[in-house]
Amino acid sequence: MEQLHVHDVITGARLFQVHPSSGSWRTRINGRDESSFTFQLRDAENPMPRDLVRDLFRANARMLVLSDGGHVKCATVNLTPVYERESGTVTVRGRGIRMFAKQRMTFGVANYAQGDLPIVGRSYSGAVRAIVQRMMQWGGIWPLPIDLPADGSGSYSNDVKRWDFYLIDDLLGQVEAEGVEVYFRPYLDAAGSVRFQTRVASQITIGSALHLPVSVEESRVTGLSVTEDGSMQLTGAFAIGEGTEADTVTGFAWAMAGEYSPVRDAAVQLKQVADVGALSRAALAELTERRNTIKEWSFKLAMDGLPVDAATPGSLLDLDVRGDEWISDGIYRQRVLSNGGVFGSFEESPEVQLYVP
């Protein structure tokens, strides 16, 4: 059964259970989660004193965590409480924990001299560890309930200087530009506090594949829609790095097998990168992601009787299609990129793409 609790943003500690009259949520593997929950302040069955309500829904200081059987479906930071006096309701809109990476640099505003962040010879996980650690490294109001990923040596280097004024999210994006995913996956610890496990991989997967017959009567899968989007397809990618005019460092990728298309090229701006190998890897990652048309499947999934985490981002779903007018017969292994739903509903709405290991 779904439950919604208010948690403290800095510690992740559970504070209070709340009962929305309505709500919706969506969680994504890239951390751009969002939610909206409406509360009736004149609810006689679940009364909340005014001071408590104001404290629980404070912007940036509180999180709303939706869970079911200990599994966290969505955890978002309260961002925009909106009170409507006529209806006696407050609607709280939230965003994922990664939003803080867009508002933190490699230094606090009072310690600019400490803003250099040399990342040398690290794995992608090790690089993300250094970046996220810097985001939270000071005390007071800096910490967040985020678990650091494993450290390790590797080929990734980025000698970040304070005068580049990069946001933490910029640095995470530079790692992701090399074909890596970073996912802050929420979970509840033994004390009921919410924390975020930092997952780093080329393709984040969770658990084993779940078989879902689509063409049978009373299928769990309804409202299936398949979109093939060719607007982003490429045949070549060019990466533009550090320097100006003739001294500009560049990298490229092309001649990759894929679906037929006339020439479609794109440039990727990475002006902080001076290494040709890193630029070529970034170009290859861009081309790999966009070489073919993007085939997105969306549908509603009846969750009653399924594991509560069956459609969490990173999960694998085997959609078994037979006798369809558009889709060829077969089992299509899809990876969940995002999932969402309506509070109190047994249906969820995953968005998936074909999984190619």
Image (spheres, rainbow, N blue to C red):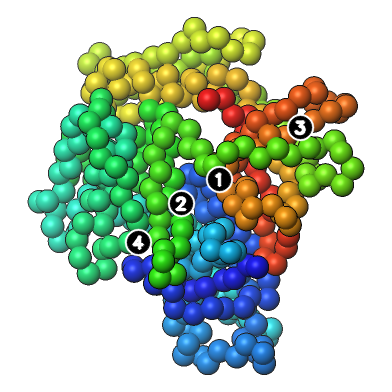
Answer with mark 2 or mark 4, whichever residue precedes in sequence.
Answer: 4
| CA distance separating discs 3 and 2 | 28 Å
| CA distance separating discs 2 and 4 | 11 Å
Is 98 left or right of 312, judged from the image as shown?
left
Residue type pointed to by label 1: Pro
What secondary structure is marked by label 3? Answer: strand
| CA distance separating discs 1 and 3 | 20 Å
Place of residue 9 in the rendered image (x, y in percent of width and height, measured from the top left): 38, 68
Place of residue 63 in the rendered image (x, y in percent of width and height, measured from the top left): 46, 68
Location of residue 215 (image quadrant): top right
Q: Is residue 171 visible?
A: no
Residue 333's place in the image compared with 144, above or below, is above
| CA distance separating discs 1 and 4 | 20 Å
Residue 337's place in the image compared with 1, above or below, is above
| CA distance separating discs 3 and 4 | 39 Å
Answer with mark 2 or mark 1, whichever residue precedes in sequence.
Answer: 2
What secondary structure is marked by label 4? Answer: loop
Question: Which residue is under mark 3?
Answer: 320
Is 136 left or right of 91, judged from the image as shown?
left
Which numbered circle lies on residue 313?
1
Is 204 left or right of 8, judged from the image as shown?
right
Residue type pointed to by label 2: Arg
Q: Is residue 289 visible?
A: yes
Which numbered circle lies on residue 145?
4
Residue type pointed to by label 3: Asp
Question: Which residue is under mark 2?
Answer: 185
| CA distance separating discs 2 and 1 | 9 Å
Callout 1 crowding tier (Cα within 10 Å): few <14, some 14–19, many ≥20: many
What secondary structure is marked by label 2? Answer: strand
Answer with mark 1 or mark 4, whichever residue precedes in sequence.
Answer: 4
